[in-house]
Image: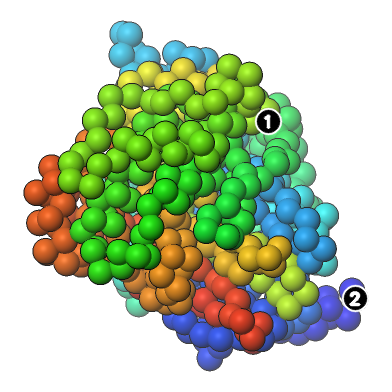
């Protein structure tokens, strides 16, 4: 292990030189692979693998690097779901979802009896207690080979030395300037005393974030959960109308969950359980679609897209009613029952829309329950370790708040609760009492880190970013690969659609054939055209054992390996 660490630190210079010779949009590798939403983060992960680290080490190093390069999407001020398939065949689901502060109440966001979603989306009341750092630490301690100091150092150095600002990140800063500019700590960290935001092409340094990451490396996660970060956050919250306390940080614990397991056309599908709705509804959508021979009608694209949209609609109607934190709500296991899926599939007609007024009643709904703007990345190594991880601070730049002097954007995951039954959140999702606000509760998520197996061997790891479209992206990518034999690169580039029951319309990418779109409209679908639906990442293994992967062309991500 000492030799691994020595070699690892020797490679830091190579990481920070940002040479991307091994990072491609799609490639083939023998020893290990990384797919992430940013080329610098992918490079960090690849160098960890080259230095002898395993897929878990690489995934955590990538997560820290993404905090630096994509602060609008994820970071230690937010949460994550880590799905690990170990070399011995064991699956581990690490729940690093944020938790509601201890003073949170069901009516926290009601003003005059009505929900004020501005409070759950921006500012001091918007944040749950961050869990990502605790999850990464747990994964390293129990399944990695590196100490947290080694895993966080490339990101800390990258924040200190800086990187060339991308047009994408500069654009996010411009778009969110009004939101993030409200808070002094954020202005100090991003504007850095200047009158203008950083623009594309400049060297972007984050000195406060670098100090925070180095402190975690030197002092461990207690610096965050029981030390200076927790103290400073509690003081800021008290001064600015928040309710988060030092005790909330000290009491945070990761959750260890039993993964969702389903099957689809001879493959095992393993995904994340509640408080993620992702795994449940990815499996439910696939269960419904298993009743239709999609491959036999390969050329009837309009029919296939109609059936897929209807399956999504049925699943999201169930999501709105049944899903919540299983430690607080009774989430029926019957949602992933194939007999129940067959009943739902019978509602789908080839030439008209199914009327879905509300949720279904799955078997065991009274007795059999599950246990009590985002980024996705995947890693795998030659030993058989695979990781699918989705991390987030929710909408772009989370709550907009950087706790002064830390460089850490705080999440706005409290908006993922149903702040009032029937009131849509920032993504237009409607929830019920199962997802109401409560102290210590984890808000419902759509994050869907998923691993598919054939004959007991992992063959695909995937997931996505994009709010509720994460679920439908993941399902569509699996359909493309498992039903139609597409490579990751071809699958990830297919035109997407998304239906989430309410509002009752189908979001469709403009790249979808106009004839197919017209056929869907003739069937009665109300379409909403969009430039792109989410961003996915996929890694897979070919029959000869080589790793392949693809980063979504809708984003700036890359695949790397060796």
Residue found at the very far top of the displayed protein: 112
Residue found at the very far right of the displayed protein: 2
Q: Position of residue 24 (x, y in %)?
A: 48, 84
For the C terminus, the image quarter is bottom right
Q: CA distance from mark 1 to mark 2?
A: 39 Å
Question: Residue 243: in sight, yes or no?
Answer: no
Residue at numbered disc 2 = 2
Display coloring: rainbow
Q: Position of residue 6 (x, y in %)?
A: 84, 80
Would you place residue 351 above or below residue 149 in this image? above
Q: Residue at x 70, y 41 (%)?
A: 258
* Structural crowding at the residue carrying mark 1, measured as other residues with C-alpha within 10 Å and reported as few (<14), some (14–19) or many (≥20): some
For the N terminus, the image quarter is bottom right
Q: Position of residue 129 (x, y in %)?
A: 60, 35
The front one of 292 and 237 is: 292
Would you place residue 342 above or below residue 418 in this image? below
- Quarter of the view holding residue 41: bottom right
Q: Residue at x 66, y 45 (%)?
A: 259
Residue at numbered disc 1 = 371
Task: Check disc 2 and report its element: helix, strand or loop.
Answer: helix
- Quarter of the view holding residue 298: bottom left
Q: Residue at x 71, y 75 (%)?
A: 381
The front one of 515 and 106 is: 515
Q: Residue at x 69, y 53 (%)?
A: 136
* Structural crowding at the residue carrying mark 2, measured as other residues with C-alpha within 10 Å and reported as few (<14), some (14–19) or many (≥20): few
Question: Residue 484: in sight, yes or no?
Answer: yes
Judged left or right of residue 54, residue 377 is: left
The front one of 112 and 308 is: 308
- Quarter of the view holding residue 108: top left
Task: Check disc 1 and report its element: helix, strand or loop.
Answer: loop
């Amino acid at each position: 292990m000492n030799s691994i660490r020595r070699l690892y630190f020797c490679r830091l210079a190579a990481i920070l030189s940002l040479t991307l010779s091994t990072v491609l949009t799609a490639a083939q590798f023998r020893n290990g692979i990384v797919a992430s939403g940013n080329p610098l983060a992918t490079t960090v992960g690849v160098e960890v693998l080259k230095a002898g680290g395993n897929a878990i080490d690489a995934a955590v190093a990538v997560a820290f690097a993404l905090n630096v390069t994509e602060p609008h999407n994820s970071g230690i001020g937010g949460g994550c779901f880590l799905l690990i398939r170990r070399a011995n065949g064991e699956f581990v689901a690490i729940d690093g979802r944020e938790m509601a502060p201890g003073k949170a109440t069901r009516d926290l966001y009601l003003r005059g009896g009505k929900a004020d979603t501005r409070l759950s989306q921006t500012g001091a009341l918007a944040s749950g207690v961050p869990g990502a750092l605790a999850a990464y630490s747990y994964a390293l301690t129990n399944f990695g080979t590196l100490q947290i100091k080694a895993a966080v150092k490339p990101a800390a150095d990258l924040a200190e030395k800086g990187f060339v600002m991308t047009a994408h990140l500069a654009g996010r800063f411009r778009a969110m300037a009004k939101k993030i500019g409200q808070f002094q700590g954020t202005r100090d960290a991003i504007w850095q005393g200047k009158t203008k935001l950083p623009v594309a092409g400049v060297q972007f340094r984050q000195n406060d974030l670098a100090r925070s990451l180095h402190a975690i490396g030197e002092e461990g996660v207690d610096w965050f959960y029981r030390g200076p970060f927790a103290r400073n956050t509690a003081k800021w919250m008290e001064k600015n109308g928040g309710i988060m306390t030092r005790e909330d940080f000290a009491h945070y614990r990761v959750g260890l969950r039993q993964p969702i397991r389903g099957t689809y056309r001879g493959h095992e599908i393993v995904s994340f359980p509640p408080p993620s709705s992702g795994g449940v509804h990815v499996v439910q959508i696939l269960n419904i679609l298993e009743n239709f021979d999609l491959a036999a009608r390969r050329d009837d694209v309009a029919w296939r897209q109609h059936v897929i949209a209807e399956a999504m609609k049925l699943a999201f109607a169930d999501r709105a009613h049944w899903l919540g934190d299983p430690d607080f709500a009774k989430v029926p296991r019957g949602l992933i029952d194939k007999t129940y899926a067959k009943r739902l599939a019978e509602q789908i007609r080839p030439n008209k829309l199914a009327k879905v007024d509300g949720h279904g009643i799955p078997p065991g709904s009274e007795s059999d329950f599950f246990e009590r703007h985002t980024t996705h990345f995947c890693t795998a190594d030659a030993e058989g370790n695979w990781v699918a991880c989705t991390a987030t601070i929710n909408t772009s730049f989370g709550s907009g708040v950087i706790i002064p002097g830390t460089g850490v954007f705080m999440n706005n995951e409290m908006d993922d609760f149903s702040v009032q039954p029937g009131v849509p959140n920032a993504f237009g999702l409607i929830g019920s009492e199962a997802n109401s606000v409560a102290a210590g509760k984890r808000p419902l998520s759509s994050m869907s880190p998923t691993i598919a197996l054939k004959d007991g061997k992992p063959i695909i790891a995937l997931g996505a970013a994009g709010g509720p479209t994460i679920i439908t992206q993941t399902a569509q990518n699996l359909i493309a690969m498992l039903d139609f034999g597409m490579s990751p690169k071809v699958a990830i580039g297919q035109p997407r659609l998304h239906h989430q029951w309410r509002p009752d319309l189908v979001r469709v990418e403009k790249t979808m054939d106009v004839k197919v779109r017209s056929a869907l409209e003739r069937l009665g679908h109300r379409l909403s055209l969009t430039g792109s639906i989410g961003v996915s990442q996929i890694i897979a293994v070919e029959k000869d054992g080589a790793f392949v992967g693809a980063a979504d062309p809708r984003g700036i991500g890359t695949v790397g390996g060796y």
